[in-house]
C-alpha cells in the first residue's frame, strides 16, 4: 500500500567520478588514433628504402629548398600585408573602412589553383590582362611562371588568413594601453610599437603559420605556374617510385611539424584576452595618407579578387557566346561536389564531436592528445594524407575494398579537415552550460531524450558552422581529390584542374565561376556575416 | 627628480563628439596645487570626457586648459598628451601584460627626454614599490596579481616620471566592493604622501566625499556645484544636487515673519541666512539623520531597514507626506509604531522655493 503522504523517490542521477575514463573518452581516443594513422604510416614507409639514399636525396633536395623558400616568402609578405590592412581598417580613419574590412577578406573564396589559372588565362592572348596591357602599350610577359609568379599569386590569396585574426585582436584590444603609453611620454608610433604590436604578435604568428602550412600543401597553383615543389615530387612519383614519393611526403611532414613547433616557441607567453568596458578607440588620423591607403586596398582587392574573377568571366562569356560552353556539362561535377561536401561535413562533425565533448567538459591529458591528433590532420598536407590512405588501401590487407571508393575520399577529407570542425564543435558543446545540463538531468532521466530536446538544439548552430567550414574546405580542395577520387568521379575542382592544364579557358572559366559562387555563399555565411556582427 | 606641484585651470571648456550634443558644456574650475578634486556625476554626464580633455586624449572645441600656468589646450595652442607631464590611471589599470611589474613601472622612465641611467631607474622603481607597498613583486607578471595589486602598480607606473598632475578615471570601479574601500584608502594615503595635484572621476558619492578635498558635481556636461563635501551635503545649490549627494527629504513649510525660520510639520526649523521673503511657501531640505523620533502620534512607521550601524525608517505623516529617517539602533522601532517627529535642533537647513 503506497503511503500518499510520502513523495515518490526519484532515481538519483549517477555522477561519474572524474578519475575513471568514460566510454566517450575511449571513443575519442580511438578516433584520434585514426587521425594519426596517415602520419604514422608515412613515417614508417619513409624508412623503408629500396633505393640508394643518395638518389632519393638528389630528387628531393631541390624541391625541398624551393618549397621552404616559397613558404617563407609568402608567409612574410602575407603577414605584412595582412597586418597593415588590419591596422588600416580597424585603427585609422580610412574612408569606407567597414566596407574594406569585409571586402578584403573576399580573396579567400578563390582556391589558389583557380586564381593561378585565372591569372594565366588573363595573360594569355585574348585574356583581359593581356588586352589591358596591350592597350597601355606594355608588352605583356610571355610567361607567368616561376618563383615570382607563385609568390605573388599565393600572397594575394592567403593574406586574409592573417587579416582575420589580427583585426579581431585589434578590435578586442584595449585602447587604454596605447593611451597609457602616450601619457607616459611616448609618441603615437612608439606607443603602437611598444604596446599594441606585442599584443597582436600571437595573432600575426598564428596567421603566418596557417599561410606557411597552406603553401606547403599547395599543389595546383605551383603546378600551373611551373614552380617545382615537394608536392610535385609526391604526386608524380607515387606510382613508379613510391619510396621517393614517401620520402618527399615525410619531408613535408617534418617541415609541417617544425613550423608548428617554431610558431609555438615564438608565441611565447600569450597574454590573456582582456575584456574592458570603456571608451572606443580614437582612430589614428591619416590625413593625406588616406589616398595611398585607399589605393593600396583597391590594388590588393583587385589582384586578389576582381582581376581573377573578371579574367574568368571574360573567357566564360566568350565561350557562352561561341556556344562552346554548355552549362549542362557542369551539372554532374557540381552535384558530385555538393554530395561529397555534404557527406564530408556530416561525418566530420559527428566524428569530432566526442573529442570536443571530452576536451570541453573533462579536460585532461588523454583528451588533449586526441584533440592534438585531429589538429595535426590540418597541418599535414592533404596530398600526404591522400597518399598514405591510397597506399594503405592498396597494400594493407583487409582495406582493399576501400581503394578508389568515394568512402576513402571522404575519409581523407575528414582527417584533413577535422580541425575545422573541432573548434566550432567545442564552442557548440560550451553552448550547453553545465547548469542547464544538470537541470535537464533532474527533469528528464532518459539521456537520449535529453540530448534530443535540450542539448542538440543548443549545439546546433555551432555544429552547423563547423559543418559549413568543412564544406567550404572540401569545395576548394584539389590534390587529395585528384589522388583519391574514384575513376570517373569528377568534381568541380578536378574538372577545372583538367581544363586549365589543357588550356580550355572558356569551359574552365564557367566551372570556376560556379565554384567561386558556391565558395562565396559559404564564406559569406560562415565568415563575413559573423565578422560584420562584431 | 622633484618637480613643483601644479595647479590645473579649466576655463570655459566644451567637448563634443561628431554629430552628438556637447559632452562637456562650458565648464570652468581650478584645482589647487597638491589638492585632490573629484568629478562626480551619473554616467553620461561628461566627467570622463572632461578628464580626457585635460589629459589631451580629446580635443576641446572651445575653451582653454592650463597646467602650472602653461596653456596646454587653447584656441591657438595644443600640447600633445605625451608632452604634458600628466599621469593617468585608467579604470582597469591598463597594465602592459607582456612586461613585468618592474618593467611596467619603469616604462615611463624610458621615454624620450627622460635622462635616467639604469641604476637611477632601478632606484626609482624600488622607491615606488615601497610607496605602493608591493615590495618583492617586481618580477611578477600583471596577470598573476590581484585587482587591488594591479591598480597599485598602475598608480606606481603613472607616478614614476614625477608628473605634475595625476588623473584617475574611475580607478576603483573594476574592484569588488570589499576591496574597494581598502584600496582607495591606500591610494589616498599615497597621493597625499606624494603631494601631486590629483583629479579623479567617479559616479560613487561615497568615494568622492571620502577622497576629494573638493568635489565638482556634474550633470549633462555642466558643473552643477563645486565645493567641499560638507558644502555640497549641507548647502546644495539645487534639488538635484541635494538628492544626488545623499538621501533628501523636502519638507513643505512656510517662512516665518522674521524670515529666519520655517514652520513645518517638524516644528520650527532654523534656516540658512539666505534672505527669503516672509510668509512664502518653501521646501526645507532635511537629511534623514536630522529627524528625531519619540513616542507620539504624528506619524506612523511604514518600513524598517536595519543596517547595523544605523536604522532607516520610512515615516508616513497624517497629511500624506513621506519622510525617511535614520537613527542609532538603540531604541528599535517596528512597523506600525506611531512616533512624533522633530528637527535636530543644532543643524541649519537649506531651503528651496516650493514647487
Image: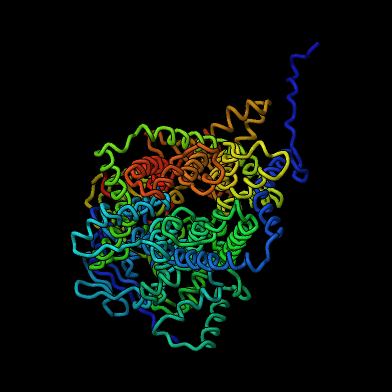
Residue A437 appears in which quarter of the rendering? Answer: top right
The reply to whether residue A389 is in sight is yes
Question: Residue B339: horizontal and vertical position, in percent?
Answer: 48, 39
| Occupied quadrant, residue B87 | bottom left
Q: Which quadrant is home to the N terminus of chain B?
A: bottom left
Image vertical order of residue A465 relative to residue A228, above or below: above
Which residue of the protein is positioned furthest toward the top in this rendering?
A1
- Residue B9 in the image, given as x and y percentages of width and height: 29, 73
Q: Quadrant of residue A436?
A: top right
Q: Nearer the viewer, residue B131 or A345?
A: A345
Q: Which color mode does the image show?
A: rainbow
Identity of the residue furthest to the front in this view = A240
Q: Residue at 23%, 68% (x, y): give it.
A: A288
Please provide percent x and percent y for residue A474. 49, 43
Quadrant for the C terminus of chain B in the image: top left
| Figure check: A234 above or below A265 | above
| Viewer-side residue, A482 vs B89 | A482
Amino acid at each position: 500500500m503506497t503511503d500518499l503522504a510520502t513523495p515518490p523517490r526519484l532515481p538519483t542521477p549517477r555522477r561519474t567520478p572524474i578519475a575513471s575514463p568514460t566510454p566517450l573518452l575511449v571513443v575519442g581516443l580511438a578516433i584520434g588514433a585514426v587521425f594519426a594513422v596517415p602520419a604514422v604510416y608515412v613515417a614508417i614507409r619513409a624508412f623503408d628504402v629500396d633505393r640508394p639514399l643518395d638518389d632519393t636525396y638528389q630528387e628531393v633536395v631541390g624541391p625541398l629548398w624551393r618549397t621552404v623558400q616559397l613558404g617563407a616568402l609568402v608567409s612574410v609578405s602575407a603577414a605584412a600585408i595582412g597586418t597593415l590592412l588590419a591596422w588600416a581598417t580597424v585603427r585609422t580613419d580610412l574612408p569606407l573602412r567597414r566596407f574594406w574590412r569585409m571586402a578584403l577578406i573576399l580573396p579567400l573564396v578563390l582556391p589558389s589553383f583557380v586564381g593561378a589559372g585565372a591569372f594565366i588565362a588573363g595573360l594569355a592572348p585574348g585574356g583581359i590582362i593581356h588586352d589591358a596591357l596591350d592597350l597601355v602599350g606594355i608588352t605583356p610577359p610571355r610567361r607567368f611562371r616561376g618563383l615570382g609568379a607563385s609568390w605573388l599569386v599565393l600572397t594575394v590569396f592567403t593574406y586574409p588568413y592573417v587579416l582575420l585574426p589580427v583585426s579581431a585582436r585589434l578590435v578586442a584590444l584595449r585602447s587604454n594601453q596605447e593611451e597609457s603609453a602616450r601619457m607616459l611620454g611616448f609618441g603615437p608610433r612608439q606607443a603602437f610599437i611598444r604596446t599594441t604590436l606585442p599584443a597582436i604578435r600571437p595573432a600575426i604568428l598564428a596567421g603566418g603559420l596557417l599561410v606557411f602550412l597552406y603553401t606547403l600543401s599547395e599543389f595546383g597553383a605551383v603546378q600551373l605556374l611551373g614552380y617545382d615543389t615537394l608536392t610535385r615530387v609526391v604526386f608524380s612519383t607515387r606510382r613508379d617510385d613510391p619510396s621517393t614519393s614517401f620520402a618527399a611526403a615525410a619531408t613535408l611532414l617534418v617541415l609541417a611539424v617544425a613550423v608548428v613547433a617554431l610558431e609555438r616557441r615564438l608565441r611565447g607567453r600569450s597574454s590573456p584576452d582582456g575584456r574592458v568596458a570603456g571608451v572606443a578607440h580614437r582612430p589614428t588620423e591619416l590625413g593625406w595618407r588616406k589616398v595611398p591607403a585607399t589605393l593600396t586596398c583597391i590594388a590588393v582587392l583587385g589582384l586578389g579578387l576582381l582581376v581573377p574573377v573578371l579574367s574568368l568571366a571574360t573567357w566564360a562569356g566568350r565561350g557562352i557566346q561561341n556556344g562552346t560552353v554548355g552549362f549542362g556539362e557542369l551539372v554532374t561535377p557540381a552535384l558530385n561536389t555538393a554530395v561529397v561536401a555534404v557527406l564530408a561535413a556530416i561525418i566530420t562533425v559527428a566524428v569530432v564531436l566526442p573529442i570536443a565533448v571530452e576536451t570541453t567538459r573533462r579536460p585532461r591529458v588523454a583528451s588533449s592528445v586526441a584533440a592534438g591528433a585531429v589538429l595535426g590532420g590540418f597541418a599535414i598536407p592533404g596530398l600526404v594524407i591522400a597518399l598514405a590512405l591510397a597506399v594503405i588501401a592498396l597494400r594493407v590487407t583487409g582495406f582493399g575494398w576501400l581503394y578508389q571508393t568515394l568512402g576513402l575520399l571522404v575519409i581523407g577529407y575528414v582527417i584533413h579537415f577535422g580541425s575545422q570542425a573541432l573548434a566550432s564543435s567545442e564552442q557548440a558543446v560550451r553552448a550547453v552550460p553545465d547548469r542547464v545540463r544538470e537541470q535537464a538531468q533532474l527533469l528528464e532521466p532518459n539521456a537520449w531524450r535529453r540530448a534530443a530536446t535540450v542539448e542538440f538544439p543548443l549545439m546546433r548552430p555551432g555544429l552547423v558552422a563547423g559543418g559549413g567550414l568543412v564544406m567550404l574546405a572540401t569545395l576548394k580542395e584539389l590534390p587529395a581529390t585528384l589522388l583519391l577520387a574514384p575513376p570517373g568521379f569528377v568534381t568541380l575542382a578536378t574538372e577545372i584542374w583538367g581544363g586549365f592544364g589543357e588550356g580550355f579557358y572558356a569551359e574552365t572559366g564557367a566551372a570556376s565561376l560556379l565554384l567561386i559562387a558556391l565558395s562565396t555563399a559559404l564564406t559569406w555565411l560562415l565568415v563575413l556575416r559573423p565578422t560584420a556582427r562584431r | 627628480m622633484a618637480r613643483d606641484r601644479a595647479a590645473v585651470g579649466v576655463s570655459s571648456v566644451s567637448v563634443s563628439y561628431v554629430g552628438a550634443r556637447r559632452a562637456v558644456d562650458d565648464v570652468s574650475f581650478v584645482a589647487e596645487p597638491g589638492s585632490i578634486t573629484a568629478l562626480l556625476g551619473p554616467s553620461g554626464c561628461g566627467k570622463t570626457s572632461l578628464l580626457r580633455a585635460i589629459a589631451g586624449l580629446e580635443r576641446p572645441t572651445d575653451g582653454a586648459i592650463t597646467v602650472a600656468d602653461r596653456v596646454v589646450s587653447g584656441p591657438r595652442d595644443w600640447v600633445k598628451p605625451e608632452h604634458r607631464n600628466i599621469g593617468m590611471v585608467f579604470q582597469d589599470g591598463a597594465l602592459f601584460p607582456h612586461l613585468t611589474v618592474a618593467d611596467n613601472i619603469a616604462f615611463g622612465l624610458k621615454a624620450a627626454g627622460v635622462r635616467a641611467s639604469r641604476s637611477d631607474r632601478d632606484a626609482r622603481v624600488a622607491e615606488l614599490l615601497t610607496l605602493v607597498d608591493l615590495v618583492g613583486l617586481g618580477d611578477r607578471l600583471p596577470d598573476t596579481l590581484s585587482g587591488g595589486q594591479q591598480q597599485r602598480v598602475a598608480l606606481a607606473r603613472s607616478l614614476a616620471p614625477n608628473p605634475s598632475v595625476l588623473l584617475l578615471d574611475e580607478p576603483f570601479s573594476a574592484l569588488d566592493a570589499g576591496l574597494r574601500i581598502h584600496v582607495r584608502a591606500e591610494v589616498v594615503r599615497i597621493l597625499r604622501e606624494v603631494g601631486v595635484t590629483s583629479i579623479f572621476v567617479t559616479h560613487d558619492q561615497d568615494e568622492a566625499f571620502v577622497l576629494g578635498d573638493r568635489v565638482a558635481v556634474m550633470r549633462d556636461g555642466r558643473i552643477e556645484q563645486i565645493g567641499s563635501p560638507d558644502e555640497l551635503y549641507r548647502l546644495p545649490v539645487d534639488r538635484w544636487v541635494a538628492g544626488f549627494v545623499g538621501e533628501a527629504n523636502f519638507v513643505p513649510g512656510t517662512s516665518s515673519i522674521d524670515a529666519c525660520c520655517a514652520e513645518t510639520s517638524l516644528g520650527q526649523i532654523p534656516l540658512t541666512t539666505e534672505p527669503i521673503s516672509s510668509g512664502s511657501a518653501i521646501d526645507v531640505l532635511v537629511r534623514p539623520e536630522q529627524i528625531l523620533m519619540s513616542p507620539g502620534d504624528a506619524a506612523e512607521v511604514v518600513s524598517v531597514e536595519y543596517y547595523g550601524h544605523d536604522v532607516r525608517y520610512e515615516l508616513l505623516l497624517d497629511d500624506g507626506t513621506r519622510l525617511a529617517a535614520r537613527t542609532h539602533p538603540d531604541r528599535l522601532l517596528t512597523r506600525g509604531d506611531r512616533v512624533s517627529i522633530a528637527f535636530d535642533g543644532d543643524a541649519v537647513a537649506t531651503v528651496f522655493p516650493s514647487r
